[in-house]
Image: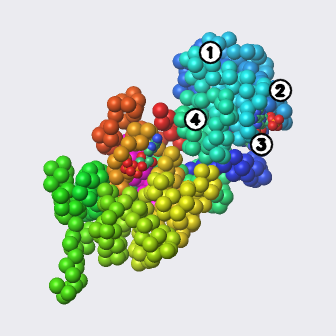
């Protein structure tokens, strides 16, 4: 079977995929049966101990409630004491059928409060606006159960979380785990803290694809473990340093050596054979002391053509497989001139543009009275591969206006910038999204924890990207593998630390080897499970 990215959908895209599957011959009740049955299997597998004390299910009147009745029926069949609280009677044909199927085995009524597992099947993708009673009252009960120590499992989305925008309505109960059906709903990745661990279950929409793999409906792609493992270049047993990628990081203005140091350390930890740190003169010693494996060099000084009669040629950069410029580069004239030189004189090198390089691009574009994307297009017109890695503030500067808060508009802005600039754009955030210059689907990287919300973590990401670039990965693959390993390392480190406070970027560096192993050897999931994203908290 071909491997392909998983799909992340809005509520409308998810519904369209459900309908397409139904139009192609799958019964809508079969989808519900499959959803409820795989969810029950996941609960029995992961929570056997808690289920021994019984389970409380909360069901709404729509199809999300229908899923809850199927879960209830399957758990009851497995011998679990099941208590169902219907916030309102089922109203859709499938939910009514599911309720009749489950009824003989259930105890109806208000949960006792002793259940240690609570299933939230009140609202799914059909939720809109502010929560209203009686659903609101039921949501409050779920939240109270959580406060009392129960584990809360949401079906498809936590009730009250908007599947499209991620907006969380007042009174929406947070989940420890969200079991989502067929496709990951976009809102879950936007509000990961509310969704907890996200487990994607196969409901027969078409395996990984959430329907037709070629469907161009705007759904985001989430690379699965096999995609990432396939993209990562193996390091040959007889590799020598010249074959593991020679890269350079240009930046480190006086007083800002740290940014290049972190990027160089990350590049080496991504398997680069040789890392050059091209820094401002006063920063050379700091690099040499802290990353002795890197080759520290000062910024090239351009001899005037009149003096030398020759074109200045900075040989180190010409020998590199990929370059990154920006970490700690500074924003003055010298920095700006250096940026223009690196971009202009090394057009054939894969290039990562980050941090101050992005600031300067916006600055030069302003001065020229043009747009940053147009300037990039001009600068990189012969380049094969460029990745820009702005955070929201840097992207706003590149756009010349605030980054839209709404995800549809934000994605449009990123995609447009990527096509106009001819560059791959990685917009950092929660989640990180990547757009390619061909206008193709957005790829999302949902990994990471607030352990990364600290100075220097973006420099680390640049170093990871440039190393993979130097090992021959295409821009999208280099950006996505790097952001994934970065986020995964943060997840592992946060878990090990038991929280964020007390941890520093060092803990993320320490977790990188384990994170790489996760990428190289993806775990296989139990039957019916397509993805399993750990909780970020
Ligand atoms: N389609 C399929 O084939 C499959 C679908 N599946 C499942 O169906 C789910 C979608 O089901 P759905 O479309 O029936 O909507 P759902 O989320 O149950 O909510 C509708 C109810 O909520 C109510 N309501 C809305 N807003 C509210 C508020 N603020 N406060 C209070 N109440 C509010 C609304 O009331 P109304 O506004 O109509 O008065 C209506 O009664 C999806 O997430 C997945 O779990 C799976 O089985 C796989 C196959
Ligand atoms: N709360 C968070 N959860 C997950 N990832 C985060 C979080 N906060 C920041 N990150 C990640 O950390 C990195 C921060 O990059 P950036 O803001 O450029 O840092 P710096 O400029 O300090 O190096 C990005 O990759 C971003 O996605
Ligand atoms: K729900």
For the residues labelled 1 and 3, the Cα–Cα distance comes to 31 Å
Q: In front: mark 1 or mark 4?
A: 4
Helix, strand, or loop for circle 4?
Answer: helix
How many residues crowd mark 2 within 10 Å: few (<14), some (14–19), many (20+)? some
Q: Is residue 24 left or right of residue 422?
A: right
**Mark 3 residue's CB less than 8 Å from ligand 1:** yes
Q: Which residue is mark 4?
A: 195
How many residues crowd mark 3 within 10 Å: few (<14), some (14–19), many (20+)? some
Circle nearer the N terminus (1, 2) = 2
Magenta span of residues: 476-489
Question: Could you tell me residue 525's position as x and y percent?
Answer: 50, 39
In this picture, is 54 found above or below 375? above
Helix, strand, or loop for circle 1?
Answer: loop
Which quadrant holds residue 181?
top right
Query: Which one is in front, 261 or 518?
Result: 261
Circle nearer the N terminus (4, 3) = 3
For the residues labelled 1 and 4, the Cα–Cα distance comes to 21 Å
Instruction: Give the residue drawn at x 39%, y 65%.
Output: 360
Query: Which one is in front, 537 or 31?
Result: 537
Circle nearer the N terminus (1, 4) = 1
For the residues labelled 2 and 4, the Cα–Cα distance comes to 26 Å
Question: Could you tell me residue 455's position as x and y percent?
Answer: 36, 45
How many residues crowd mark 1 within 10 Å: few (<14), some (14–19), many (20+)? many
For the residues labelled 2 and 3, the Cα–Cα distance comes to 20 Å
Residue 89's label in the rendered image is 2
Q: Which residue is mark 3?
A: 28
Helix, strand, or loop for circle 3?
Answer: helix
Helix, strand, or loop for circle 2?
Answer: loop
In the rendered structure, are the residues bearing label 1 and label 3 in contact, judged by CB atoms less than 8 Å apart?
no
Instruction: Give the residue drawn at x 59%, y 21%.
Output: 146
In this picture, is 133 found above or below 28? above
Residue 115's label in the rendered image is 1
């Amino acid at each position: 079977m071909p491997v392909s990215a998983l799909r992340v959908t809005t509520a409308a895209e998810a519904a369209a995929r459900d309908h397409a599957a139904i139009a192609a011959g799958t019964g809508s009740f079969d989808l519900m049966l499959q959803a409820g049955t795989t969810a029950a299997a996941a609960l029995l597998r992961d929570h056997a101990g808690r289920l021994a004390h019984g389970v409380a299910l909360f069901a709404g009147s729509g199809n999300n409630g229908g899923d809850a009745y199927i879960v209830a029926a399957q758990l009851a069949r497995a011998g679990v004491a099941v208590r169902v609280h219907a916030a309102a009677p089922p109203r859709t044909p499938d939910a009514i059928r599911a309720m009749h199927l489950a009824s003989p085995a259930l105890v109806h009524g208000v949960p006792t409060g002793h259940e240690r597992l609570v299933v939230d099947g009140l609202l799914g993708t059909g939720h809109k606006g502010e929560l209203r009673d009686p659903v609101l009252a039921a949501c409050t009960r779920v939240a109270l159960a959580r406060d009392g120590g129960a584990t809360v499992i949401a079906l498809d989305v936590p009730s009250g979380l908007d599947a499209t925008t991620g907006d969380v309505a007042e009174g929406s109960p947070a989940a420890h785990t969200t079991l989502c059906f067929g496709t990951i709903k976009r809102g879950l990745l936007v509000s990961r803290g509310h969704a907890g661990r996200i487990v994607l279950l196969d409901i027969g929409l078409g395996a990984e694809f959430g329907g037709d793999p070629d469907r161009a409906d705007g759904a985001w792609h989430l690379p699965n473990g096999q995609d990432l493992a396939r993209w990562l270049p193996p390091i040959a047993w007889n590799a020598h340093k010249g074959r593991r990628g020679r890269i350079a990081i240009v930046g480190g203005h006086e007083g800002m050596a740290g940014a290049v140091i972190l990027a160089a350390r990350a590049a080496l930890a991504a398997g680069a054979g040789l890392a050059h740190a091209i820094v401002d003169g006063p920063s050379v010693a700091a690099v040499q002391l802290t990353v002795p494996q890197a080759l520290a060099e000062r910024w090239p000084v351009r001899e005037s053509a009149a003096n030398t009669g020759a074109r200045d040629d900075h040989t180190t950069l010409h020998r590199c497989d990929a370059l990154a410029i920006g970490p700690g580069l500074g924003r003055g004239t010298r920095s700006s001139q250096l940026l223009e030189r690196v971009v202009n004189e090394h057009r054939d090198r894969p290039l990562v543009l980050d941090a101050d390089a992005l600031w300067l691009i916006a600055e030069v574009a302003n001065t020229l009275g043009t747009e940053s994307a147009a300037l990039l297009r001009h600068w990189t017109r012969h380049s094969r591969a460029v990745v820009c890695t702005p955070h929201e503030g840097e992207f706003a500067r590149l756009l010349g206006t605030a980054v839209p808060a709404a995800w549809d508009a934000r994605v449009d802005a990123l995609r447009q910038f990527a096509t106009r600039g001819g560059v791959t754009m990685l917009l950092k955030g929660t989640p990180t999204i990547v757009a390619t210059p061909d206008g193709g689907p957005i790829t999302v990287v949902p990994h990471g924890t607030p352990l990364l919300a600290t100075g220097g973590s973006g420099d680390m990401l640049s170093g990871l990207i440039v190393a993979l670039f130097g090992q021959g990965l295409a821009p999208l693959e280099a950006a996505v593998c790097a952001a994934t390993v970065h986020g995964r390392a943060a997840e592992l480190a946060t878990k090990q630390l038991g929280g964020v406070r007390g941890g520093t970027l060092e803990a993320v560096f320490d977790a990188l080897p384990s994170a790489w192993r996760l990428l190289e050897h993806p775990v296989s999931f139990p039957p019916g499970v397509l993805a399993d994203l750990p909780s970020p908290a």
